Image (spheres, rainbow, N blue to C red):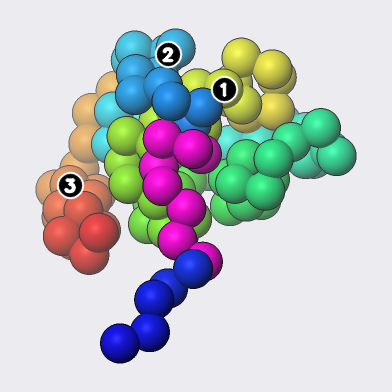
Amino acid sequence: MEEDNSFVRPFIITGGRVEPTQSDLRLETLVVAVRPPDESLTFERKRVAAVCASPTTVAEVAHRVGVPLGVAKVLISDLVAVGHLACRQPAELSLHTLERIRDHVRAL
């Protein structure tokens, strides 16, 4: 059996942190890039910023970047803190949106 050496442990990506600095991030929170990624960002943070070129939910970011939801929340909150991303909480979710989130979470 071959070993997959490309796997990076989630705690390495987040610097050992398990809680995001921004505590109000929910699955349906919309995240959008407010400036392009620069060379100061790590690989995963650049990917998150690129995924958020158009408004994207936290759940979709996790899925598209290929990281657990908790890791995505930590990365997103870090990028918000340094001014690369902005977040917006939707006031009320439609049934269609809830079903899409459910489907994305199941895909994780």
**Residue 15 seen in the current view:** yes
Circle 1 SS class: helix
Which amino acid is tagged 1? Asp
Residue 18: quadrant of the picture: top left
Label 2 – label 3 distance at C-alpha:
22 Å
Q: Is residue 101 left or right of residue 83?
A: left
The answer to if 45 sits in the magenta stretch is no
Label 3 – label 1 distance at C-alpha:
26 Å
x and y, in percent, of residue 87 in the image: 50, 25
Which label belongs to residue 78?
1
User: Mark 2 or 1 closer to N-term?
Assistant: 2
Residue 19: quadrant of the picture: top left
Return the residue nearer the eye: 108 or 32.
108
The residue at the point 62 percent across, 51 percent down is: 47
Q: Nearer the viewer, mark 3 or mark 1?
A: 1
Q: Which residue is mark 2?
A: 22
